[in-house]
Amino acid sequence: MELREYVRIALRWGWIVAILGVLAAGGAYVVSERQTPVYEASLTLSVRPARANEDLGRSVGALLRSLAGDITTYSFLQQVVERGQLEAITADALLSGKVLLVEVEPADYTIAIAVRHPDASVAVNTANEIAALFVARREAWNENQNPEVQIDAGIRDYARSVGVYSPKTKLYVAAGGFLGAAVGAFIVAVVEWLEAATVHSLRDLEHLDMPVLGAIPSRSGRRR
């Protein structure tokens, strides 16, 4: 099609695309606002060899995933709940895979911990208790080890604030608006395809290579 045809379609049917986009975005916003917010508190643990040694550093990097795996055990998390007197969360909930996330970065000797919960204070307190118990266990382990092979663990910064993990209202509204507009564009394309056989102007006859015998003027003055 020529450019003027796209302009004609936009002027004729653009309101459908706009309305569906706005309605879909509005619907996404309403659904998002009705969801219970889930907050995320996060912190980073530093796990390094007690002394600077290249071989020991590589060993710690290799063991980091195993050390982080101790966090995601029932016995460890149950001790976290009891030690911190956390009544709003259980070890089973933390092990569900949706509440507690543990990520390892061997190159930086760090373990990232994130806790998600509808109560912001519960998320913060749980994350801090997990980190505190991990450090306490490493310190107890070091007491029975030769200083040459000790592994130090520390908390870079306690979790003090939280971010909203879900719902992501802005993302939902943008996605809803885009999908609504896409549906509107599809409807317009179908309508235009169904009307493709209709002659709208004398220019349309030129594409059909048919002789024009006459034209009946419309009330608006346009020739059809």
Image (cartoon, rainbow, N blue to C red):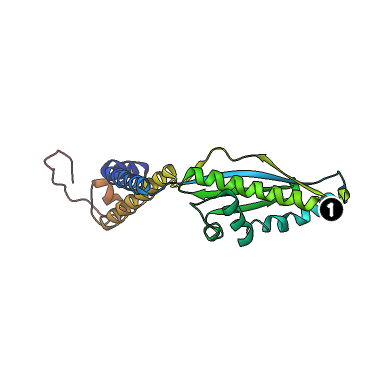
Residue 10 at x, y = what percent?
Answer: 31, 42
Is residue 159 left or right of 25 when viewed as pictured?
right
Where's residue 195, x and y in %?
25, 55
Please name the residue shown 30% across and 54% down the image.
187
Q: Is residue 138 left or right of residue 42?
A: right
Name the residue nearer the viewer: 85 or 148.
85
> Which one is in front, 174 or 48?
48
Q: Which of 20 and 95 is in front in this view?
A: 95
Q: Residue furthest left?
A: 219
Residue 153 left/right relative to 101: right
- Residue drawn at x 78%, y 56% as measured from the top left: 62
Which residue position holds label 1? 145
Left or right of 134? Residue 63 is: right
Dividing the picture into quadrants, the one containing residue 128 is top right
> For the image shown, how many numbered marks are present on the structure?
1
State the image coordinates of residue 122 (x, y, percent, origin top left): 51, 46
* Whether residue 1 can be seen here: no
Give the residue at x 51% y 41%: 163
Q: Residue at x 23, y 52 (%)?
A: 199
> Residue flagged by tag 1: what amino acid is it?
Gln
Q: Residues within 10 Å of mark 1 (few under 14, many from 20)?
A: few
Secondary structure beneath label 1: loop
From where the camera sits, is residue 128 visible? yes
Query: Residue 103 at what x, y percent from top left?
Result: 64, 52
